[in-house]
Image: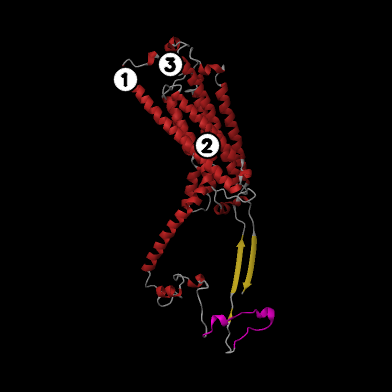
Amino acid sequence: MSSAAQPADPAAAAAAMAAAQAAMLQFTIEAWTLLAIGICVTILRTYARVKAVGFRRLQADDYLVWVGVTFYAVETSLAYSVGAVAQGLANNGMTDEQRATLSPDSAEYRTRVIGSKIQLAGWSSYSVLLWSLKASLLVFYMRLTAGLNRTYTIRIYVGFALLIASFMTILLNLFLGCRPFHKYWQIYPDPGNVCQPAVSNEVIWVYLSMNVITDLYLISIPVPMLWQSSLKPAKKIGLIILFSGGLFVVACAILRCALIVTDPVNGAQLAGSWAVRETFVAVVTTNLPMIFPLFKVWLGPILGSLLTTMRSQQKLTDKESRSDLRTFGGGGNSKQSWRRRGGGPPTANPITNITFSESEERMVDEVKMQDLKGWTDTSTTGSGPTLNGNGGNNNIRKHVEVEVVSEARDDKEMLDRRCPVGDEENQHGNFSFARGPRRSSYTGHARM
């Protein structure tokens, strides 16, 4: 700070300095921790994709997320430099008298110039970071909606056009809004608000408007599709929340701009903290749909065993409550009968649940199992089944009919059959749910 802005009380100055150092330490820990988590999430996403499709079949969105995380590291370094190098100073927050008396040879002057350049670089990295992640989502949506109505494809193409137009708008506004360009770090005379990159209203509102418009449009692509689907309510709500993470990014962007506008002196440093949080959420929400299936695979055995235990306890509770209830085919003492046979417990529809295994025998007329002969189809041999010496029919006959029918489904039903957040791709690199509608019918008969 300039000498005119320093507190007259040394104790107050020391307290302010201690508070600033504590805030800087807290921000440093938070910023680098979030960056480490963001990099780990991106690595997990790449691992999941390589495991699903192989390294050679990675798509454009898999590379765009690495562009985003690279500039996320750059942005975090610049945000750290705002406090560690520039001490939160730039060419804003000064009166005309302070500007006139500040010597160009002083350390504060050089610090403010460096701080202004850091702010300008921060806006640039922020642009590339967010817009590369937005482009990655659009590429993912193209695979997600492949094989569905052409309306979704048109909306995605419109999204690409909107993304390109908004990106050009923010860059042209940033680099052409202040002319000549060196006024972005000019101290004296006052270059005006438009040439103060830390608090420029023109830069702030253009970035905010383009960011909000593009995020809301990206959310409008998958959310209506999920809302109109026939998924279970819990799964539907979970997926909608997963794809609506951009709303938190929008909230962070609005809060960041509000801090800058309401506090032109210290708001820039606070805004840097919220910029790091905003971009962290953007990185995580962009990669989460890809790593969600990986978490399902890793947590599946744990959750599966837990659900099995809960269902077993529920079945035991239900069985005890219905111990006096007889069902058709259940026998006199259903509990003892199924335990004696070694099979499962009787159900309300026991006929449809009968299965035969090697451990279950049916004895007929005291005929031993080793004396039974296989049944011969009389329709093909012309002779009847062979009888034993006692005139009994010691044959085994099993008739199995299998009928499998699959039919084409509309867009909503196709959505229900897929995992819209997964990477379930076949060996050709295409999503299993993106191969288009199919119709086939097969009826088979087997006899043993």
Q: Percent x, y for residue 70?
A: 54, 33
Task: State the residue position of label 3.
Answer: 94
Task: State the residue position of label 1.
Answer: 12
Is 416 included in the stretch rendered in magenta?
Answer: no
State the count of labels: 3
Residues shaded magenta = 366-388
Indicate whether 160 appears above or below 384. above
Is residue 145 found left or right of 75 in the rendered image?
Answer: right
Q: How crowded is mark 1: few (under 14 residues within 10 Å), some or many (20 or more)?
A: few
Q: Is residue 286 shown to the viewer in this render?
A: no
Of the pair 129 and 261, the residue shown nearer to us: 129
Please name the amino acid that badge 3 sits on. Answer: Met
**Residue sitting farthest toward the front:** 370
Element on which disc 1 rests: helix
**Label number found at residue 218:** none
Q: Percent x, y for residue 39?
A: 51, 37
Of the pair 422 and 74, the residue shown nearer to us: 74
